[in-house]
Image (spheres, rainbow, N blue to C red):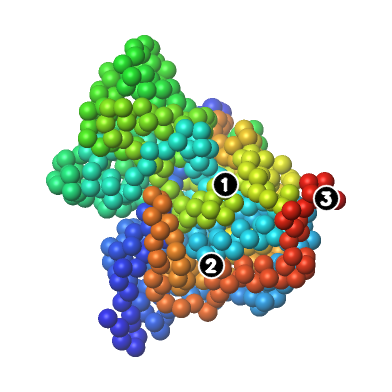
């Protein structure tokens, strides 16, 4: 329904978090260029839609001076063409179409490309490669799961509709009574807003998730576990035995895990232990495991970068072909070690959430940012573009946290360009400046070092 | 008095809503500079709600305000803070070859900031 002043957009998509809820009904004030009502949105989604109107900001800032988008593209292209060890980073809050262009720039300049996955579920990605993944869509979990275990996360505050749309309360084909047909378990080091949702809350001591998971693996396989596990982890053996039995006897179990596992000591070992537990359980019943993803298209970043390069994050093109090595070519490391000599940051704000030494290095090198909002990273940038907001102003494709692609239905136009437009402009100008790829395909290894 | 505690960084609802308004705005700055602390730990350190404390790690330090949590919700010795510039001040750059810096379960020193302490901010 539309008139001259307002528009209603149905089946719109919220891209605040990885739930990517695509059942929004938005009321848009076309004169004020803002969304006045967002039906079906959670508290985070309502804030996302309410706060993304059109702000009066320069199209670009170059060395702090207001500039046009085209002037910004010229300045950004020169930085990237002159850099010897540039990193492209971010990408979790933009469209797959823009992500694809970013990968092609990394290829052209022979640089590194990394996404926010590396400081999110990057360790899970490493664990997937080592252990494997028993997958399911959120729809399958909604319709089938009678045991859902949330481990190391707080969905009530970070992904509110994960509970109400997919994994706790909704009625499903094989769980017709919704939450009454499910057992909900929450494992965490502290009580959170998510705890009241759980039928069983298991409070583990910090830094003992791996031990708890390994004990569960033993119990699932019928091995004995020493009661001293309680002294180590804070969890009585009887509680673990009960959980192991519940896991083996459910019809469809799901382990949904958060960054309580990946940002903690043990990182990919923790995630790997959980994935291995899910694998073990498939000897007895159907069990899946999935990371709960934060940003609206961080899963798309994994997919796009993987299908373009063969690897999910932390990639180096310096030899003219992609190589993958977390810890060496991941942005947090490249910056903290002071190695990168330029950075292109897309839809991310590492200056407010990276480590102190990494942020200090961002202040030392030329930085280019693309963001709808001013951030600490845009403030320190040599070139800062204002871009339109994906999902609200920009069409395209994003991936839900379960790897389901979803088409965006924008609410209103923005005067600012999309990330894809700016990145395409940068790529074409870099192509001209470099005369093609810095390291042409098929270049002998020795030649690439000259 | 200085005590060693363990700091957990994480997301919160207020952090999520305030970052939509803008990460340079007062709301985001406010929610990312509040540390949740066990009420018994606060009492022992002579801290009240909104008291300022200095958190110090091997790489840096930051001054934030306290918010009490009951022992059943937040065990003694544990702290929680919403991710942001304050928590970044405490994070080391080392990722142990994974790409992921440790941002949960950081060992920190906790020191009350007195009114006469001009370095507290």
Work out which residue is located at the far right of the displayed protein and give it.
A450
Where A111 falls versus A410 (above or below)? above
Tags 1 and 2 in contact by the CB under 8 Å rule? no
Q: How many marks?
A: 3
Mark 1 Cα shell of 10 Å, populated few (<14), some (14-19), many (≥20) = some
The residue carrying mark 1 is A311
**Are callouts 3 and 1 both on one chain?**
yes
Q: Which mark is residue A372?
A: 2
Q: Nearer the viewer, residue A42 or A299?
A: A299
C-alpha gap between disc 1 and disc 2: 28 Å
The chain holding disc 1 is A
User: In this rendering, does residue A362 appear at all?
Assistant: no
Q: Which mark is residue A447?
A: 3
Tags 3 and 2 in contact by the CB under 8 Å rule? no
Please indicate whether residue B71 sits to the left or right of residue B52 in the image.
left
Q: Secondary structure at mark 1?
A: loop
Where B22 falls versus A156 (above or below)? below
- Image depth: mark 3 or mark 2 in front: 3
Q: Nearer the viewer, residue B59 or A62?
A: A62
C-alpha gap between disc 3 and disc 1: 25 Å
**Are callouts 3 and 2 both on one chain?**
yes
Instruction: Give how far across and how far down residue A265 sits, in percent.
Output: 53, 30
Question: Which residue is depicted at the point 39% across and 71% down?
Answer: A409
Question: Which residue is depicted at the point 72% across and 52% down?
Answer: A320
The chain holding disc 2 is A
Q: Nearer the viewer, residue B107 or A6?
A: A6
- Image depth: mark 1 or mark 2 in front: 1
| Disc with the residue nearer the chain's start (3 vs 1) | 1
The chain holding disc 3 is A
Instruction: Give how far across and how far down residue A311 sits, in percent.
Output: 57, 46
């Amino acid at each position: 329904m539309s008139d001259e002043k307002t528009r209603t957009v149905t089946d719109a998509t919220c891209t605040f978090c990885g739930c990517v809820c695509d059942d929004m009904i938005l009321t848009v004030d076309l004169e004020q260029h803002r969304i006045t009502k967002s039906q079906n949105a959670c508290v985070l989604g309502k804030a996302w839609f309410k706060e993304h109107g059109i702000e009066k900001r320069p199209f670009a800032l170059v060395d702090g001076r207001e500039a046009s988008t085209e002037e910004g593209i010229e300045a950004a292209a020169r930085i990237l063409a002159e850099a010897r060890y540039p990193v492209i980073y971010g990408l979790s809050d933009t469209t797959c179409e823009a992500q694809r262009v970013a990968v092609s720039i990394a290829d052209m300049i022979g640089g590194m490309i990394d996404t926010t996955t590396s400081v999110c579920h990057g360790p899970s990605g490493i664990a997937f490669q080592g252990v494997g993944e028993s997958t399911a869509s959120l729809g399958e979990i909604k319709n089938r799961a009678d045991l859902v275990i949330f481990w190391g996360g707080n969905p009530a505050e970070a992904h509110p509709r994960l509970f109400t749309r997919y994994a706790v309360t909704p009625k499903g084909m094989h769980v017709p009574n919704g939450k009454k047909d499910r057992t909900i378990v929450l494992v965490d080091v502290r009580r959170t807003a998510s705890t009241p949702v759980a039928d069983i809350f298991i409070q583990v001591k910090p830094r003992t998730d791996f031990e708890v998971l390994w004990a569960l693996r033993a119990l699932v396989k019928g091995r004995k576990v020493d009661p001293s596990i309680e002294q180590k982890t804070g969890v009585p053996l009887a509680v673990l035995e009960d959980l192991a039995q519940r896991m083996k006897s459910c019809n469809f179990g799901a382990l949904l895990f958060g960054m309580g596992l990946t940002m903690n000591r043990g990182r990919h070992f923790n995630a790997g232990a959980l994935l291995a537990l899910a694998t073990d359980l498939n000897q007895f019943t159907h069990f899946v495991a999935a990371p709960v993803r934060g940003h609206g298209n961080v899963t798309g970043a994994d997919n796009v970068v993987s299908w373009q390069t063969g690897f999910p994050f932390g990639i180096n093109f310096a030899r003219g072909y992609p190589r993958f090595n977390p810890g060496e070519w991941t942005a947090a490391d490249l910056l903290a070690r002071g190695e990168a000599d330029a950075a292109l940051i897309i839809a991310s704000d590492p200056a407010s959430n990276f480590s102190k030494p990494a942020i200090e290095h961002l202040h030392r090198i030329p930085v280019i940012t693309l963001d709808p909002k001013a951030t600490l990273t845009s403030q320190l940038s040599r070139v800062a573009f204002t871009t339109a907001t994906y999902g609200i102003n920009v069409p395209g494709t994003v991936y839900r946290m379960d790897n389901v692609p979803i088409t965006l239905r924008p609410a209103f136009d923005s005067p600012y360009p999309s990330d894809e437009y700016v990145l395409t402009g940068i790529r074409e100008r870099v192509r001209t400046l470099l005369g093609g790829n810095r390291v042409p395909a098929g270049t002998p290894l020795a030649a690439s070092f000259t | 008095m200085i005590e060693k505690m363990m700091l957990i960084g994480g997301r919160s609802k207020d952090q999520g809503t305030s970052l939509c308004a803008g990460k340079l705005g007062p709301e985001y700055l406010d929610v990312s500079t509040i540390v949740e602390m066990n009420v018994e730990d606060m009492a022992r350190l002579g801290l009240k709600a909104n008291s300022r404390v200095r958190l110090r790690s091997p790489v840096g330090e930051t001054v934030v305000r306290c918010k009490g949590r009951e022992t059943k919700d937040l065990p003694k010795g544990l702290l929680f803070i919403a991710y942001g510039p304050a928590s970044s001040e405490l994070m080391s750059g080392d990722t142990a070859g994974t790409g992921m810096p440790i941002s949960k379960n950081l060992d920190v020193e906790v020191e009350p900031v007195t009114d006469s302490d001009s370095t507290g901010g």
